[in-house]
Amino acid sequence: MPETPPLEIPALPAVVPPLEIPEEVFAGVTLNRIAFDREFDSPVMLATVPEGEGEQVIAMQRGEFCAVKLDGSGEWRVFLDFRKRMEGLTLFEEGVHGIAFHPQFETNRLFYLSYTQNEPRRTVISEMRATPGSAPVALPESERIVLEIPQPLADHWGGHISFGPDGFLYIALGDGGLRNDPYRLAQNPWVLHGKILRLDVNRRTGKLPYGIPADNPFANDQLVRPEIYALGLRNPWGLSFDTHTGHLWCADVGQDLWEEINLIKKGANYGWSDRDGPVASGFHPGPLMADTPFTEPVHAYTRQRGEGICIVGGLLYRGEKMPALEGSFLFADWGYGTVWALEMDSFNERATRRLLIHRKPEAMKLNPTLITADAEGEPVVLSQEGNLYRLEYGEEVAALEE
């Protein structure tokens, strides 16, 4: 057999583009570890138990789910042990990707999981029930498979899930792997890779194990999968809804040059892999679909300026303890351990200034996997090595805000 040719890596542009918005240091916010008597290895998501006793469930990549209280008591208990199901899944992106509680969890006890499996390689979205009471635990024997997506390769899974204010389940999926999206899946309207999906888990359409919302943008288009809400994403990671406006935000992990933040709109196309961040890519001889309009990212940063290598979403801050950050989008870089806040324009659709909140000290083990919120809307940082942190004002800043 002939040798496989080496992958072609495009040369970096000679001119480093300037930062399109000003950046300033935002002093006075500290990253404080939340005390527990254990580590939560590779946490990928934190979901609040609806109508519960202030508990949230941490989903860990290798299959453990723990219900915790983030009040400083260090309380935790097992919610679901799915590690047997995850046996043999050892590659960097394989495993559990998300958990989301049904909006009517208090009465129906339903929640949803996103994870991967092998033989065949696939992403699984499933439904499961939990026991009644104020300290629920999962009932794994109740699992119902909602959707399975075949995966060509073992990376760019995406996989975050979240219920929107409309009651529908949103699913973020990556392009399926390898450099340059070689199969052009992210722009292909008849596959689910590189897309945001929107499903109605409360009903069924035909023989599907889920429903297609009637107002999905392509629900009546025979040329596009009706599950698709938005498309043109590479490896979306960090799906969140603004609790004030209902806007959907998503960070998208880049390839060589750009990391981006997108405001997800119904039917929008975010360009990958015809575009890379805010610029046209050189990966393909031409666009997959001619005359396709693309939606630009709200913000993009680049490795060329040494800003980071892997973006992590992300939420619009709507808490009460840090009023100076109200309406700012909080995000981080997994590789550099940097945390930023984006100040937004009055329409909350365009970044106007980037605030540097935290830069990881060299000796610190910090690889953020998600910035999310506790039950009160205050930001929590999950880190791959197993710790959870709060972003909080230091005492001097807190005193000034009072």
Image: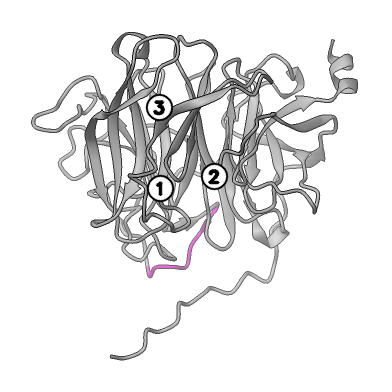
Residue linked to disc 2: 42
**In the rendered structure, does residue 284 fall within the stretch colored magenta?**
yes
| Magenta stretch, residue numbers | 278-285
Mark 2 and mark 1: Cα distance apart in space: 10 Å
Front of the two marks 3 and 2 = 2
Left or right placement of residue 380 versus residue 216 in this view: right
Decide which of tag 3 and tag 1 comes sooner along the chain: 1
Looking at the picture, tell me which residue is in the foreground, 29 or 300.
29
Decide which of tag 2 and tag 1 comes sooner along the chain: 2
Left or right placement of residue 34 versus residue 287 in this view: right
Residue at (28%, 46%) from the top-left corner?
A: 192
Local crowd size for mark 2, using a 10 Å CA cut-off: few (<14), some (14–19), many (≥20): many
- Callout 2: SS: loop
In what quadrant of the picture does the N terminus appear? bottom left
Residue linked to disc 3: 100
Left or right placement of residue 357 versus residue 131 in this view: right
